Image: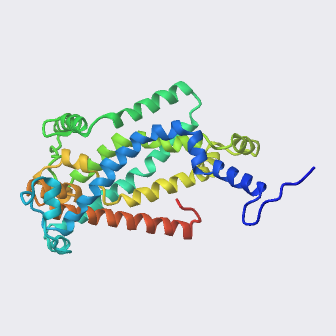
């Protein structure tokens, strides 16, 4: 049998075959085989481009003196507004209310992190130990339901119970105690924010931890039972370490949102009487941007918040990787 010899400067048959196979197994080959998946992703990509990437041009307002009437339309006005550099960032740090707003945001976020972060983990551990499946399903349904209520509805529910003439104050009066203005008392309002946020989202946050528990090898529990470990020891030495990476992931992401104290919740529930303890960055941006039509300063505030959140996520992930040996990336 004769062999085919390639001419000088031309690839051999084997080289052609390898290149053809490599191209077919590359990105375009995979795309041709899974064209339906890429077609299904087009709406999601368009959503990201239209609502996430194109609006990023609006961040230039933080470095401009925006004038709504300088152009023929909103985009033209943004483009024609003069550049002023870091002027609005300097205004932020010289604003008398800025430090108070930052302090309120940090206090409310840290209260929620300290008091609410362990609760979903505890509920997930308790639900995981239930042996009656019908009871487990009922409890899960009950604790999940508040998540699907809007903050407007939740405000109405709690105001009817804890308002000046609500059920709680009527009970306090019947017992001989003074009524408490939960929604206008600066000593109680932050507690009210933490409690209502926990009531709404604690059950929903347990889903992630329960899902992580389903991946634990049942043989670990069987071996622990053979060794005489009780339920608490099995929970502490098997369940908790097994979901440790998920707990760390949620904690790092939560630290990155420490400047997000719950815009919708605070906007619906607060009032001028509690501005001193409840006005956070997002509500302050809302009042400055729409109330005073100072779009440049509100954009600068939002950009400042995003940069700080990015730094917090990066630093907390680096600390976790260095000292705990676990990280998101």
Residue at image position (39%, 68%) is 311
Given residues 311 and 243, the one toward you in this image is 311
Q: Residue 211: x percent and y percent?
A: 54, 41
Residue at image position (46%, 37%) is 40
Q: Does residue 236 appear to the left or right of 220 in the view shown?
A: left
Q: In the rendered view, tell whether residue 195 sits above or below residue 258.
A: above
Q: Residue 57: x percent and y percent?
A: 26, 59
Given residues 300 and 116, the one toward you in this image is 300
Given residues 296 and 185, the one toward you in this image is 296
Chosen colour scheme: rainbow
Q: Does residue 54 appear to the left or right of 312 in the view shown?
A: left
Q: Residue 210: x percent and y percent?
A: 53, 41
- The residue sitting at the top extreme is 134
- The residue sitting at the left extreme is 69
Count of numbered badges drawn on the protein: 0
Can see residue 186? no
Q: Does residue 297 appear to the left or right of 35 in the view shown?
A: left
- The residue sitting at the front extreme is 7
Can see residue 44? yes
Q: Residue 312: x percent and y percent?
A: 39, 66
Determine the image quadrant of residue 300.
bottom left
Residue at image position (29%, 58%) is 56
Given residues 4 and 254, the one toward you in this image is 4
Residue at image position (19%, 63%) is 61
Q: In the rendered view, tell whether residue 33 sits above or below residue 67.
A: above
Q: In the rendered view, tell whether residue 288 sits above or below residue 63.
A: above
Determine the image quadrant of residue 96.
bottom left
């Amino acid at each position: 049998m004769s062999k085919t010899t390639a001419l000088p400067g031309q690839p051999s048959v084997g080289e052609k075959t390898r290149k053809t196979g490599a191209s077919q197994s590359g990105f375009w080959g995979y795309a041709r085989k899974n064209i339906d998946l890429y077609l299904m992703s087009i709406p999601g990509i368009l959503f990201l481009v239209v609502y996430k990437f194109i609006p990023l041009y609006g961040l230039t307002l933080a470095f401009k003196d925006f004038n709504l009437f300088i152009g023929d339309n909103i985009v033209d006005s943004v483009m024609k507004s003069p550049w002023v550099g870091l002027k609005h960032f300097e205004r932020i740090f010289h604003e008398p209310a800025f430090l108070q707003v930052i302090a309120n945001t940090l206090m409310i976020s840290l209260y929620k992190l300290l008091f609410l972060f362990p609760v979903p983990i505890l509920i997930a551990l308790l639900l995981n130990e239930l042996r009656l499946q019908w009871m487990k399903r009922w409890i899960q349904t009950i604790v999940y339901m508040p998540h699907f209520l809007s903050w407007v509805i939740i405000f109405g529910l709690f105001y009817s119970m804890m308002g000046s003439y609500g059920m709680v104050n009527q009970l306090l009066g019947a017992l001989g105690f003074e009524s408490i203005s939960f929604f206008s008392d600066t000593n109680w309002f932050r507690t009210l924010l933490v409690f209502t946020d926990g009531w709404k989202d604690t059950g929903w946050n347990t889903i992630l931890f329960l899902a992580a528990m389903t991946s634990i090898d049942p043989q670990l529990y069987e071996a622990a039972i053979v060794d005489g470990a009780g339920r608490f020891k099995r929970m502490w030495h098997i369940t908790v370490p097994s979901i440790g990476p998920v707990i760390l992931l949620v904690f790092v992401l939560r630290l990155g949102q420490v400047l997000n104290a719950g815009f919708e919740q605070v906007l619906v529930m607060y009032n001028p009487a509690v501005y001193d303890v409840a006005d956070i960055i997002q509500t302050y941006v809302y009042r400055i941007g729409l109330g005073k039509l100072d779009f440049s300063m509100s954009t600068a505030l939002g950009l400042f918040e995003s940069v700080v959140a990015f730094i917090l996520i990066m630093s907390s992930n680096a600390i976790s990787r260095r000292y705990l040996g676990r990280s998101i990336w």
